[in-house]
Image: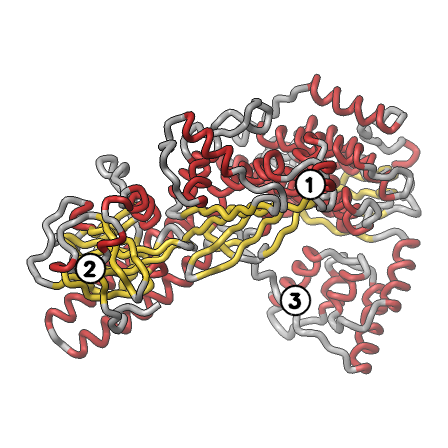
Amino acid sequence: MLNGDQWSQLLQGFIEEARDLSQQAEEYLLQLDQQPDDAEAINGLFRAMHTLKGSAGLFSLTPLASFTHHLENLLMAVRDGQRRLEPSLVSLMLRCLDEIVSMIALIDAETGELPVDEAHQAELLAALAAHLGEPLASAPETHEAPAAAQDERGSGAWHLSLRFDGDLLRNGFDPMSFIQYLGRLGTVTSLEVLDDNLPPFAEMDPETCYLGLEIDLDTPASKAEIEDVFEFIRDFCTLRMLPPASTLDDCLRLIQALPEADERIGGILVAAGLLTEHELQQGLAVQASAPAEKPPLGAVLVEQGLVAPQAVDAALARQQKTRRDGERRAPNTESTLVKVAAHKLDELINLVGELVISAAAARMQAQEHGNPLCQESAQTVNQRVEQIREAALKLRMIEIGDTFNRFHRVVRDVSQQLGKDIRLEIRGADTELDKTVIDKLADPLTHLVRNAIDHGIEPAEQRLAAGKSAEGHLGLNAFHESGMIVIEVSDDGRGLNTARIREKAIERGLLDPQANPPEHEVQRLIFAAGFSTADNVSDLSGRGVGMDVVRSAIEALRGSIEIDSRPGQGCVFRIRLPLTLAIIDGFLVSLGGEHFVVPLNLVTECLELDEARLGRRAYGHIELRGRPLPCIDLAAHFDLPSSAQGRRNIVVVSLGRRQAGLIVDELHGELQTVIKPLGLLFEHLRGISGSTILGSGQVALILDIASLLQHLQQNADAEPRAHAHPVPARPDLAGQ
C-alpha cells in the first residue's frame, strides 16, 4: 500500500519527467523555428506533448492535461500537413510552453493540487484559436461503450485483458479512471467485468479490488501508447494486449520486411510493434524462473497471452533467415543509465573527502614509524583512494551542452524584442563540468548573453554600413585548458567603448583623470558595482546591476573572468573555472608556521629567492628571465612572521594572461585537497577561498589566486619596476 511519502515520491517523479519533457519540447520548437519541415522534430515535439498529457491525466492534473491537449491537437494538424509552423506560431507555442512550465512548478508534491491562472490560459488559447482562424477542439470526453456494443466483441479492436492487484484501491488508484482515459485514445467497443475472484460476502474486504476486465478498444494508437495508460499501475496489475486482426496482418508483413539486423525473437516482435519492452522483460523473467529446462521465449510469450502464436511463427521464420544470412548483432543489454538524487552524490563526495584525509593521516603515521611494510601499504591505499576520488568526481560531471542549448530561446526572444537578426553558435557542448558549477553558471551566462545582444551586436543597418553581414553572430564555447574549464561568450559586434568606460569611471570617481592605465584595466572597470555606460534604462539593461554580480558569482566558484575586446570586431568574455568544487590537487606551502594550499593547476614553477635582495615588502616586482614578475609576499600580506632563514621560495602562478609570484617560506609538495567551507569569521577574508584538513590534523587555508592577483594589481605601483631584482633561472621544483 502506498503511504503519503510513497505517493509524494511518485508524484515527484512525474514532476521531474514533466520538466524534462517540456525542455525537450522547447528544443524541438526552436529547431523547427529554423527548419519548419523537419519531420523528426515535429514527431519528437508531438511525442513529448502526448506523453506529458497522458501522464498528467493519470495523476488527475486535469488543468495541465487539458491545456496540453490543445497543443497536441495543433501539433497533430502540423504533423498531418494541415498547418505550418510559422515563426509567429512558434512564438505563441513557446509562450504556451512557458505556461506549462509554470503549471508544473505550481504542483504541490504532497497533495497533488494545481492552482491555475485560468484568465492567462484562456488568453493563450484564444490567441491560438485566432492565429489558426478557427476554434481549437476541446479536450475529448470519455467515450463509454454503448449497451449494444457490450454484448458483442469489436472485430477491429485491440483486446485488453486486465487483472488488478488486490491492493490497487488501497494504493490510491481508481480502476475506472484508467478505463475513462482509454476513451481518449479511441472508442471502447466492449467492456466485460470479471467477478470470478469475488469471495463470499462475509469475507469481502471493501478496500480490496477483486475485479478483472476484458476490454475491446478501437483506436489507431500503437501498443506502446496503450500500455502507457497503465504505466503507473504496472506493479498493481497484469495486462495482456492482442492487436486487431488487421493490425496483426500488417505486423506479420512488417516482420517479413524487417532489416536483417536482429536475430532475437523478442527484438523482432518489439520492432514489429507486437510486443513492448516491458512485456519482453516480463517474458524473459518467466523464462529465467523456469525450474527445469528453460522453455523457448516464444512459447512463454504465447502462454502468457502477450502475443499471438502466428506472430511468434513469423518471428521465428525471420530469425532463421537472419541466421542463414550470417548477420548477427551483439546480445541484448540492459540500460546502463541510473538516476541518482544529487544529495546522494554529495554525501558520497563528502565521504570520499573524509577517506582522503584519513589516508593522508595513515601515510604520515607510516612515515613516522619508519616501517617499510607499513609505508608500502599506506602508499597502496593512497593510490586506491586517489582512484576512488577520481571515479566519484566523475559521477558529478555532466556535459555543458544542455545549459548552452537553453540559450537558443534567450537569443531568439531578446533578438526579436530588439529587432535584430542573431544566430547562436555553440561549440564544446560535450565538455564536462561539475553539476554544482553548471547550476550556478546559468545566471552569469544569461546576463553576458543578454548584454552581448543588447550592447554588443549592432542593428542590421549599422552592421551593413560597417561592412558586416546583417546577421549577428553570438558564440558559446567551452574547452579544457591547464586543468581548468574555459567558457567563452563571444560576439562579432562593436566591442567595448573604452573611451566611454573611462569617461563614466572618472565621473564616478573610480579612475583618476590623470591616470593612464592599460586598456584591459579600463575594460575591467565594467565589473565595478553599479557601473553602467547606458544613458537610457531598458527592460534588458542600463540599471547598473549585473556585471559586478557576474564577477562575484564567478569568483564564488573560485574562477575568474577576462575580457578580450577589439573595437569594431567584437568582444569575448572568457571565464575560467575549476572542474570541481569538492576535491582538488593542491600544492602545500607554509609561511610563518602556518600552512597554505595553492591549486596545483595554477602553479607554473617554483624558484628559490634570496630574501636579502627583496626586502620586507608586501608587493613588488622581480626580474625573471629578463621580464618583470609582480610578486606578493604572503607573510606580509597576511601579517604573519616570516621564516628566519636567509632564503625563501617563489611559487609562480598563472591565471589566464596574468602571472605572478607568491613568496613563501617552505615548499612541501603536492597533496589531495578536500575543500571545506570557511566559517563566518573568515568567509570575507580576502585571498582565502576555503580550508582543508591535513593528514596531521592541522588546518590549511586554500589561497584564492584570482583575489590575490587582483589585490596585487591594485598595489602594483607600490614597487616601481625600475627596482626589480633579477632572479637567476633555476631548475623547477614543481613541474607544470
- Residue furthest left as drawn: 644
How dense is the environment of label 1, judged by Cα within 10 Å: few (below 14), some, or many (20 and up)?
A: many
Between the C-alphas of marks 1 and 3, the distance is 42 Å
Q: Amino acid at mark 3?
A: Gln
Q: Quadrant of the C terminus?
A: bottom left
Identify residue for label 3: 287
Q: Secondary structure at mark 3?
A: helix
Whichever of labels 2 and 1 marks the residue nearer the N terminus, that label is: 1
Q: Is residue 709 above or below residue 290?
A: above
Q: Nearer the viewer, residue 86 or 6?
A: 86
Q: Secondary structure at mark 2?
A: loop
Between the C-alphas of marks 2 and 1, the distance is 50 Å
State the mark number for residue 484.
Answer: none
How dense is the environment of label 3, judged by Cα within 10 Å: few (below 14), some, or many (20 and up)?
A: some
From the top left corner, tell me how far across and down residue 694 is, in percent. Answer: 21, 57
Q: Secondary structure at mark 1?
A: helix
Horizontally, is 476 left or right of 616 in the view?
Answer: right
Identify residue for label 2: 695
Q: Nearer the viewer, residue 553 or 114?
A: 553
Horizontally, is 148 left or right of 287 in the view?
Answer: right
From the top left corner, tell me how far across and down residue 594 is, in percent. Answer: 15, 52
Q: Is residue 353 above or below residue 152?
A: below
How dense is the environment of label 2, judged by Cα within 10 Å: few (below 14), some, or many (20 and up)?
A: some
From the top left corner, tell me how far across and down residue 658 is, in percent. Answer: 38, 53
Q: Amino acid at mark 2?
A: Gly
Identify residue for label 1: 26
- Residue 229 seen in the current view: no
Answer whether labels 2 and 3 touch (C-beta < 8 Å): no
- Residue 509 seen in the current view: yes
Between the C-alphas of marks 2 and 3, the distance is 55 Å
Whichever of labels 1 and 3 marks the residue nearer the N terminus, that label is: 1
The answer to which image quadrant residue 151 occupies is: top right
